[in-house]
Amino acid sequence: METLLNLPQGQFELQRLPKRKLEKLRAWDAADEYLLQYVSDNCNLSSATKLLIVNDGFGALAVALHAFIPVAISDSYLSRQATKLNLAANGLPEDSVKLKNSLDWPKQQVDLVLIKVPKTLALLEDQLIQLQPLLTAETKIIAAGMVKAMSSSVWKLMERYLGPTKPSLAKKKARLIFISFNIQKPLAENPYPVCFQLENTRFRICNHANVFSRESLDIGTRFLLQHLPKNTDAKDIVDLGCGNGIVGLMLAEYHTEATLYFVDESYMAVASAKENFQSAFERRQADFCVTDGLNEFETESMDLIVCNPPFHQQNTVGNQIALSMFKQSQRVLRKGGNLWVIGNRHLAYHIDLKKIFKSCNEIASNSKFVIWQVSK
Ligand SMILES: C[S@@+](CC[C@H](N)C(=O)[O-])C[C@H]1O[C@@H](n2cnc3c(N)ncnc32)[C@H](O)[C@@H]1O
């Protein structure tokens, strides 16, 4: 796979994360190239320019513009790690980009904002609201994305929260949107986190903007909750890809003595899981970790892992992350430990699970979902 990106700003070596043996995808897209070409041709950047980058995929924008010491905000642990890795791969110091997560916005005003349009509209909405106080009438704002990801809702959100928009021509199926900030706009109230009552429980679930199924209980998760293991002798239990932590919350309810570990690569997900757990169990300790799957867990340290795996990374669909989670679970489970997985029937997770764990039991299924259990 091509890893060398040629730009007016220079030539950069860029890799995606997680690393895969036979990577077929590049660490940047045509929208990154279009945006960087436009910035080089039209924006007179200097060391005094206050530059903010939002949702950089794997660091292509931040690495190419490192000379201007940008602030880069992302909700993805993998994006942040990839930016660090790519800075190092190009011999650039880590502090040439100020990395921030989506819950930690800068306070100073900015001159140029570059936004990659995220997959989740709610995240974009939250980001536009967080941006408002950082903008002046002179701030240039440019959003970039692949045409297929820029629905009319994207434009509407930008006009609603910032001001008039103007499209570029499409180039290699990518487009830029130029947004003029209307300083007369009153600062908007942020609707996030949003909350709902978890059916048949005492739990109120609150979700930051980028959390999976933030408005209501997902139908797959509901099916999983109906079949979760109860009162087993598991002492250490992981909610892997926890989202708002509903699965771990119910596992904690069914395993009063166990320690729960909540893991997700989204900062907003782990923050939501932590807030939800702490309001559900005031005095109970648990572990909350923003990371890539089980990478940071010790070998043979957990008894039970429950996972509703992701089926996309940024805008790319696939079962690679799920497969890596299954392999990691094999390493991290103690002998006799169990992994429970729910998936859409067509994803056929049992094929990979059988390869890794030898045998695989179907716990429950309906027309859409199957729950599988494997033991180490
Ligand atoms: C289908 S959602 C499941 C959320 C929640 N467990 C539920 O059932 O409602 C998958 C979750 O995996 C997370 N995820 C994606 N890639 C990950 C990775 N590499 N490591 C950890 N979590 C990841 C996503 O952010 C998302 O919250």
Image (tube, rainbow, N blue to C red):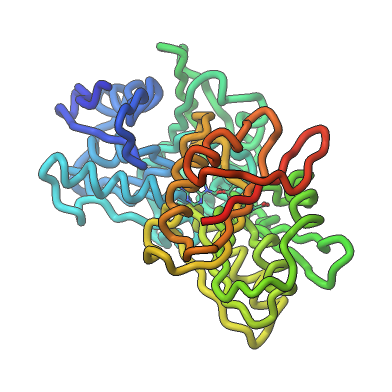
The residue nearer to you, when weighing 61 against 85, is 85
> Furthest-bottom residue in view?
283
The residue nearer to you, when weighing 73 against 349, is 349
| Left or right, residue 71 beside residue 292 | left
Task: Examine the rendering and report whether any part of residue 180 can be seen.
Answer: no
Indicate the quadrant containing the N terminus: top left, top right, bottom left or bottom right.
Answer: top left
In the depicted structure, whether residue 253 falls above or below residue 82? below
The residue nearer to you, when weighing 307 against 327, is 327
Residue shown at 31%/44% (left/top)? 82
User: Residue 250's spot in the image, x, y percent?
Assistant: 73, 67
Residue shown at 49%/29% (left/top)? 316
Residue shown at 75%/38% (left/top)? 369
In the depicted structure, whether residue 320 falls above or below residue 34? below
The residue nearer to you, when weighing 277 against 228, is 228
User: Residue 38's spot in the image, x, y percent?
Assistant: 32, 23
User: Residue 352's spot in the image, x, y percent?
Assistant: 52, 36
Task: Examine the rendering and report whether any part of residue 150 can be seen.
Answer: yes
In the depicted structure, whether residue 20 falls above or below residue 177? below
| Left or right, residue 126 beside residue 24 | right
Residue shown at 38%/24% (left/top)? 29
> Furthest-left residue in view?
91
> Furthest-right residue in view?
200
Total numbered badges shown on the rendered structure = 0
User: Residue 192's spot in the image, x, y percent?
Assistant: 67, 57
Choose top left, top right, bottom left or bottom right for residue 200. bottom right
